[in-house]
Image (cartoon, rainbow, N blue to C red):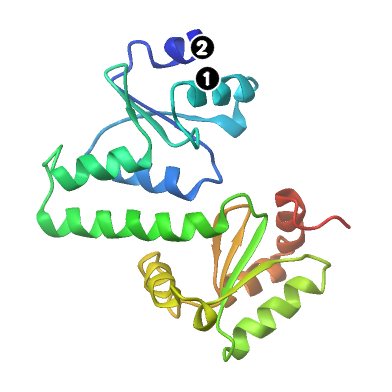
Amino acid sequence: METVKRLVDGKPVVIFSKSTCCMSHSVKQLISSYGANATVYELDELPNRNEIDKALQKLGLKPSVPAVFINQRLIGGAKEIISLQVQGRPSITSKSKTANILAILQAMDVVNRLVEQKPLVIFTKSSCCISHSVMQLISSYGAKAEVYELDNMPNGQEVDKALQRLGLWPSVPAVFIGQKLVGGAKDIISLQVQGRLVPMLKEAGALWV
């Protein structure tokens, strides 16, 4: 607790995050869209990350990130920030921009629940040939992906819309490595050509060979 207090002391806005956390990324974007200059601590890049992670959990945050402090006061995580946004506090942006940011945050929440704690996730459709090719490419390296076929999911349409709101068109294939959105087929092929795909899979723990 003392460590967290020292890190937030004297700073108007502090966000504890993880570089691989989709929701943390969205919350940071939302807050910065108001012009706020937040101090951001990426837990996975700090030497005492485990200590801080446990401290945030003891403060009632599960998951521990994102954790937002304003004027040294704990506001909460993504749900609390979304709630404040819905209530219009702070209301210093246009209604259309507010609605768009909120929609993106909600989309991130839907997708984040599906990719959480999984090293490799691929969203696809059973009828999509390109998705099938991407899965074959990735599995050829020995990587085992968690695959969600949108047309075989009860909330498939909701997830489809969420992926589109995240900038994916078409929505599939959508590849997440280490809980981070890498992109669609073009992005995977680009990583492959650059020789970056395998190292990324290894770093995320999706590839053991």
> Which residue lies at the image location 18% right of the left edge and 47% below the top edge?
86
Q: How far apart are marks 2 and 1 (CA)?
A: 8 Å
Callout 2 environment at 10 Å: few (<14), some (14 to 19), or many (20+)?
few
In the rendering, at what x and y percent does residue 190 appear? 63, 71
Local secondary structure at mark 1:
helix
Label pair 2/1, CB-CB below 8 angstroms? yes
In the rendering, at what x and y percent does residue 60 appear? 44, 26
> Which residue lies at the image location 47% right of the left edge and 60% below the top edge?
111
Quadrant of res 160: bottom left
> Which residue lies at the image location 50% right of the left edge and 83% below the top edge?
151
Res 23 seen here: yes
Q: Nearer the viewer, residue 176 or 126?
A: 126
Please state if 142 lies on the left or on the right of 60 as rendered.
right
Quadrant of res 110: bottom left
In the rendering, at what x and y percent does residue 79 appear? 33, 43
Q: Which residue lies furthest to the right in this view?
A: 209
Please state if 129 lies on the left or on the right of 107 as rendered.
right
In the rendering, at what x and y percent does residue 38 appear? 34, 29
Q: Mark 1 points at which residue?
A: 55
Q: What residue type is labelled 2?
A: Thr
Name the front one of labels 2 and 1: 1
Q: Nearer the viewer, residue 60 or 9?
A: 60
Res 32 seen here: no
Q: What residue type is labelled 1?
A: Ala
Local secondary structure at mark 2:
helix
**Which circle's residue, 2 or 1, is located before the other in the chain?**
2
Q: Which of 149 and 122 is in front in this view?
A: 149
Quadrant in which the C terminus appears: bottom right
Q: Is residue 163 above or below residue 99?
A: below
- Number of the label disc, if any, that sits on residue 3: 2
